[in-house]
Structure formats: structure tokens, C-alpha cells
Image (cartoon, rainbow, N blue to C red):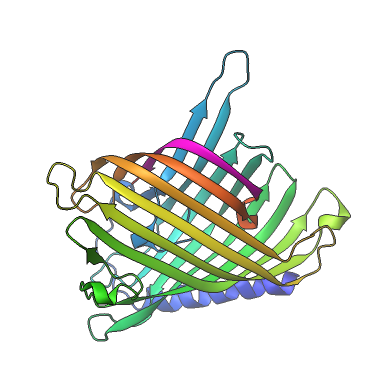
Amino acid sequence: MKTINIINVVFFLFYSSIILGQQKQKKSQSIFNRISLRKSFQSTNSTAEPATITYTKSKGKSSSWLLDAAIGVDLTPRDSIKAISLTSYFEYHKNTLINEEQNNWLTGLALEWLIFDIQKKNWTPILISSIKYNKDNFNDVSSFQGSYYFTTIFKRKSNLKYFWIPNNIVNIGKSIQFNYTPYFGIENENRISTNQDSNNGSIYRAYFRVTPYLSIFKSYKKLNKLFDITADWQYRYNLYENVSSLNRKNHKFFFISANYIFFSNNDGNKTAKIGIDYTNGGNPTIGFKEQSFYAVSLKVQL
């Protein structure tokens, strides 16, 4: 499906050139200030999850790893407009704690665009898009992938009756803050190299995702900003595919984590946590097959 790959690239470069062309470049920043570390580039910058690592070493047995990490370099010229970001990134996902092991890396470009000016309107859709090369080492599959997700943001209404508004932080009593982010979109995967003919082909998926977030113990001064609970539910449905080895049309994924935050800067965009995690389901975009497991993980976001 070379035509679809070309469409992905043209679409991405077209919008990137328009958006970046609208900005007036200022003095360049230090490269270190442009580097970010997170779990993945499948979410908005403001709701990005921290990179995760778990390591176990049992006596007489081989070591086991879980690593979900993405490092990105912001390519956006710096000016007063903060509605657009363009990032070059590399992700690595490895998990040997589970029966169906995962060993997947990918690299590409990620675009986030707040389409309307939130200062002039009450809301704006947000486009989160990426094109990347993906290598599933465990299943020996190489592919080009594209994703186009949308969410929305509204001017903040902190009253609890507005809890249903996406990306809107509300107070539940004095001790809890809550918000959630829904995503809708399309994904495509065009396989260019596989270990057997039955794995060849292309896949086009509809995508829905919800990521709730709770910050707890807000009313206790000594515990404020020290604990949070995050969750992630994803649903993918194959709209079209011509890969003969596939045996399912949909993929569900669920993740929940309770965390202790032992470091956070003033803005809260650089954090370090220890969390208890539960994962159930599968995510075909990063080579994670249907299964479930628990883990205690160190999490870092920069």
C-alpha cells in the first residue's frame, strides 16, 4: 500500500509546513530544554504519562524487564503561539514479565495542533497525529503506521456539575480532583516486511480511548500532590484488513495505576513516581498481545 504511505507523509508535511510557517521564530532554545521523556506519543502533551521501568532478578533465573519509554525532541520554533508542537521521537517497549513477550521500537514525527484559539473561543478540537516506522522484533514484522486522533478542550469550569466536560479539572469534595480525556480517531498499519506471507498486508482501524485521572488527598497539606490514580481504556476495531493471519476484529486494552509521587517540579510536567499497575488486554500498535499482569514500576517524566 505505497499510495497510503505517501498520503500519510504528504498530509503530515502539508499541515506541518502550514503550521510552522505561521510562526515567527525567536532565539533558539537549548537542545536540553526541547527534550522530553514520557511513556508514548499517543496522547496530548498535557496528559502524557511518565516512562515506566520494572526490573526483576530471581535467584537461579534470568532477569525480567518492563520498559515503556519514549524520548522526543521538540522541533517547533519558539514564539508566543503555543497551539502547535512538532516532535521527532523514538519509542521502545519491551516486556519479558509476561507469557507473550513484547519487544517493539518505533520512530517518527508527532504533531499536536489546537485548531482554534482557546482565548477567543470557548473550546477547541485538538489533533494528535503521527507517522512512524515500527519494528516488532518478537514477531519479526516491520511496518509504516499513521494515526489521527482528536480530542477537545474547553475553558475551565471547576464546578462538579461540569465533570462530563473533557479535559476539565473538577473538585470532588475537598480531597479529590478529577478529569478525563477522550480520543477518537483512525489508525493505519502498512506492513513492509514480515517473517511469513500470512502476516503481509494492511490494516485500518477505528480508535476510541478514555484516560481518567484522579489526584487524591488534596485537602491534606502533607499529602497534597503526593498520590494519584490513572487509568487508560482503549478500543480498536478493524475497519479493513487483508492480513490472512489475523483472527480478531477488535482489540481492548485496560490499564490502571496507583502512584506515589516523590518528585515534581512547580509546573508538574517533570515528575518521578512509584506505582502499582494492572494491565489487561492488547495494543497491536506496539506489539503487545492480549494478556494481563501486575507490576510495581518506577515512572519518570521530563
| Residue at the limit of the structure toward the left, as seen here | 221
Label count reads 0
Rendered position, 233 above or below 295: below
| Residue at the limit of the structure toward the bottom, as seen here | 121
Q: Residue at horizontal 51%, vertical 77%?
A: 14
Rendered position, 46 above or below 97: below
Q: Residue at horizontal 28%, vertical 45%?
A: 227
* Residue 72: % across, % down: 43, 52
Q: Residue at horizontal 58%, vertical 70%?
A: 207
Q: Which residues are magenta?
A: 290-300
- Residue 148 colored magenta? no
Taking depth in this image into account, of 182 and 104 the one nearest to the observer is 182
Taking depth in this image into account, of 131 and 216 the one nearest to the observer is 216
| Residue at the limit of the structure toward the right, as seen here | 197
Rendered position, 23 above or below 266: below
Q: Is residue 120 left or right of residue 249?
A: left
Taking depth in this image into account, of 175 and 289 the one nearest to the observer is 175
* Residue 253: % across, % down: 57, 56
* Residue 114: % across, % down: 36, 75
Quarter of the picture holding the N terminus: bottom right
Q: Quadrant of residue 19?
A: bottom left
Q: Is residue 23 left or right of residue 282?
A: left
Q: Is residue 46 left or right of residue 221?
A: right
Rendered position, 158 above or below 94: below
Q: Is residue 291 visible?
A: yes
Q: Residue at horizontal 35%, vertical 43%?
A: 259
Main secondary structure along the magenta-highlighted residues: strand
Q: Quadrant of residue 236?
A: bottom right
* Residue 280: % across, % down: 57, 50
